[in-house]
Amino acid sequence: MPEELFPDLFRELIPLPKNPLRAVNSYVIRGDGRFLIIDTGMNRPECGGAMEEYLKVLQVDLTRTDFFITHFHADHLGLVSELFQPTSNIYMSAPDDRSFRDPEHWNGMAATARINGFPEADISTAIDRHPGFKYHARHNFTTTFLREGDTIRIGDYTLTCIETPGHTRGHMCLYEQRKKLLFSGDHILETITPNISLWAENEDPLFAYLQSLDKIYNYDVAHVLPGHREPFFHYCKRIDELKRHHDARNDEILSILREGKKTAYAVASRMTWDIDCKRWKDFPLPQQWFAGGEALAHLQYLQGKGKVKRKLRDETAFFSLI
């Protein structure tokens, strides 16, 4: 059943079966004759059924409903293509809309995996099993782009957009200043850490993510409404914890590289992961994929800090200490 967090602001857990995230938080704000849904779940029957019941209980009229998508990942965007109506606005950032619509998105990820040591035999299987590939939205809707400082007004809520790149290029949070609420998407989560992955050349998502954490640190926030797990209130404390987590990750990678040069895939296989598998080879392929992307993001960040160097040999990238 939907939970009313604040007047006319509701949350429902949309299930993500056989996924470590378990569920995505979908928020509904009820205004005068109109509704706003923040994030939707994956485009799969289990999510669709839960969303249908959610909207039925709240008596949401989809013909009078708009959608705000914090970022383009399938667990947040996927179901919108089944929900929107000709009268709907679908709000998202332009960078994430481009990523979502890029016909070379998965080919580019495959190429990055290949050059960074991911076994060739596993690449296509990993993509085929990737929930973002299997359960994404159909490309049949028009997006209304929002940027830093733009506002959405719905009922008693005025939501200001904050650009927070890192988890994705165009990740965006919503801030309600008077009520001190932050819809944080996957930028800040409480009991789990957002996955910061690199799947393209010439980017540094971890650097962008840490900058985005610093950017929002001094906002006056009393309640964080995240994309996953429970809402929470210890805002600055959690930001500090996330920064320490990435410092520890960097230290762990530097320790691994003291043994000698390694690919990002090899580094990932030696890192500590919170997953119920004793050996790297027992990790499900999608989890190996996420781990490899996170290891690569940290290696790119350390390269930018002048602590690690990258060298190509036989079309494979190896990282070593400077």
Image (cartoon, rainbow, N blue to C red):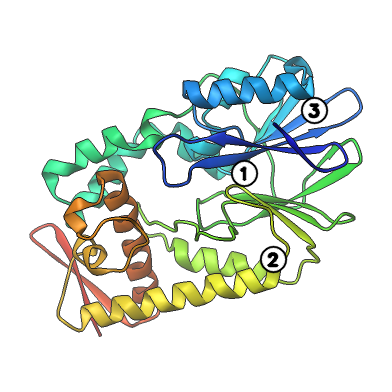
- Residue with the mark numbered 1: 70
- Of 170 and 131, the residue lying toward us: 131
User: For residue 95, what is the image quadrant?
Assistant: top right
Tell me the kind of residue under disc 3. Answer: Phe
* Image point (58%, 69%), residue name: 211
| Tag 3 near tag 2, CB within 8 Å | no
The foreground one among 5 and 44 is 5
Residue 131 x/y as whole percent: 38, 36
Q: Nearer the viewer, residue 59 or 168?
A: 59
Label 1 to label 3: alpha-carbon separation: 17 Å
Q: Residue furthest left?
A: 314
From what the image shows, is residue 215 above or below residue 31? below
Quadrant of the image occupied by residue 154: top right
Q: Secondary structure at mark 1?
A: loop
- Picture coordinates of residue 256, whole percent (x, y): 23, 78
Q: Please give the name of the residue rendered at 20% of the width and 84% of the height, measured from the top-left corner.
A: 258
Q: Residues within 10 Å of mark 3 (few under 14, many from 20)?
A: many
How many C-alpha atoms fall within 10 Å of the one at disc 2: few (<14), some, or many (≥20)?
some
* Position of 234 relative to 95 (above/below): below
Position in image of residue 187 (x %, y %): 58, 56
Disc nearest the viewer among 3 and 2: 3
Q: Is residue 118 toward the left or the right of residue 139 in the image?
A: left
> Dot 3 corresponds to which residue?
35
| CA distance for labels 3 and 2 | 27 Å
Any part of residue 171 in sight: yes
Quarter the N terminus occupies: top right
Q: Residue 205 placed where, x, y %? A: 46, 61
Q: Are marks 1 and 3 in contact (CB under 8 Å)?
A: no
Categorize mark 1 by other alpha carbons within 10 Å: few (<14), some (14-19), many (20+).
Answer: many
